[in-house]
């Protein structure tokens, strides 16, 4: 089982912070009792706790509405939560607040996280180069020349060097998603988040994008991946987490999770998507 490690409680001076044991060497991401709801009736993260190592590729699976995408969005700092706390690289990162507007402890840590969304989110009025260099120049402090050199490097690695001056409207869906991955890599993150990045693509384009992610896996990039593709989850993941109704139901190595899930709810889900006997 994946053993979530705690972060030091005295680093927080806010309500709703639970009393946790000290952080241990090797902690990379830690979710501790994270609770998020919309109003009183819609709970999307029900005291979730999990952890991952720096060499993990954590794959989150589960039915729609189980809290998978919310987990990524609160990790990225795009959405708040009411209770609990998140640590990153062994440091306090974000804690919840009753208002749901979480307080970010260390904004520098957020810049070390890259995220790729389902629908590309490229700026249509900017070229591929313009999309890639915007954040490194405006946020990362790189010169335009250095950012352009870095962009060329990433596009070459992803087989898109000929698209440097193209606009998003001139790209296929697979090319757009590869550009989105390159853009996320431009700030040289320590952690990459992928939220259903192939669900809007046709099968041939799915293979393009999955191959890029497998290349990143070979380079030991830490990743949290939300996907409905169980075969890809099995290929890329070092750990698999099954979520349902906002809770972590089960987690483990892909071989164990897909061949012999321990929890009835996990088995029920996998029977539907993998036709387990």
Image (cartoon, rainbow, N blue to C red):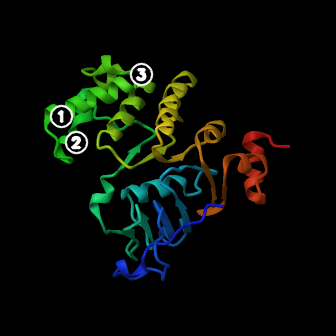
For mark 2, does the 10 Å Cα neighbourhood hold few (<14), some (14 to 19), or many (20 or more) residues? many
The mark nearer the N terminus, 1 or 2, is 2
Q: Residue furthest top?
A: 162
Mark 1 touches mark 2? (CB < 8 Å): yes
Residue visible at 14% across and 34% down in the picture:
144
218 lies left or right of 10 = right
Distance from label 3 to label 2 (Cα)?
25 Å
Considering only vertical position in the picture, is 188 above or below 77?
above
Q: Which mark is residue 256?
A: none
Pointer 1: residues within 10 angstroms few (<14), some, or many (20+)?
some
The residue tagged 3 is 172
Say whether residue 185 is left or right of residue 195: left
* Residue occupied by mark 2: 136
Image quarter (top left, top right, bottom left or bottom right) of the N terminus: bottom right
Kindly identify which residue carries mark 1.
Answer: 146
Q: Earlier in the sequence, mark 3 or mark 2?
A: 2
x%, y% of residue 91?
Answer: 38, 67
Element marked by disc 3: loop
Residue 6 position, x and y percent, is 49, 72
Q: Secondary structure at mark 1?
A: helix
Identify which residue is drawn at 37% across, 74% down: 99
Q: Position of residue 9 (x, y in %)?
A: 42, 79
Residue 170: give x, y in percent of width and height: 33, 19
Earlier sequence position, callout 1 versus callout 3: 1
Residue 193 visible somewhere in the drawing: yes
Q: Using the rendered image of the protein, determine whether residue 126 is visible from the camera's viewpoint.
A: no
CA gap, disc 1 and disc 2: 9 Å
User: Front-most of 69 and 31?
Assistant: 31
């Amino acid at each position: 089982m994946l053993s979530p490690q705690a972060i030091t409680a005295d680093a927080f001076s806010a309500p709703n912070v639970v009393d946790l044991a000290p952080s241990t060497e090797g902690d990379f991401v830690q979710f501790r009792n994270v609770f998020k709801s919309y109003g009183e009736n819609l709970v999307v993260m029900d005291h979730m706790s999990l952890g991952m190592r720096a060499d993990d590729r954590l794959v989150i699976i589960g039915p729609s509405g189980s809290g998978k995408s919310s987990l990524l969005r609160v990790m990225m700092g795009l959405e708040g939560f009411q209770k609990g706390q998140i640590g990153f690289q062994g440091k306090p990162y974000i804690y919840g607040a009753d208002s749901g507007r979480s307080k970010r402890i260390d904004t520098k840590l957020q810049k070390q996280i890259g995220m790729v969304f389902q629908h590309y989110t490229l700026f249509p009025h900017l070229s591929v180069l313009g999309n890639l260099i915007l954040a490194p120049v405006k946020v990362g402090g790189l010169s335009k020349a250095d950012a352009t050199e870095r962009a060329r490097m990433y596009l070459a690695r992803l087989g898109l060097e000929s698209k440097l001056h193209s606009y998003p409207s001139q790209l296929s869906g697979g090319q757009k998603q590869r550009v989105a991955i390159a853009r996320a890599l431009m700030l040289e993150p320590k952690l990459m988040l992928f939220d259903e990045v192939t669900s809007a693509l046709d099968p041939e384009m799915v293979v393009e994008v999955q191959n890029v992610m497998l290349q990143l896996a070979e380079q030991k990039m830490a990743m949290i991946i939300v996907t409905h593709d169980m075969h890809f989850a099995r290929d890329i993941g070092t750990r698999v987490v099954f979520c349902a109704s906002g809770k972590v139901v089960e987690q483990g190595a892909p071989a164990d999770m897909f061949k012999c899930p321990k929890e009835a709810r996990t088995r029920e889900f996998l029977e539907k998507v993998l036709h387990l006997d």
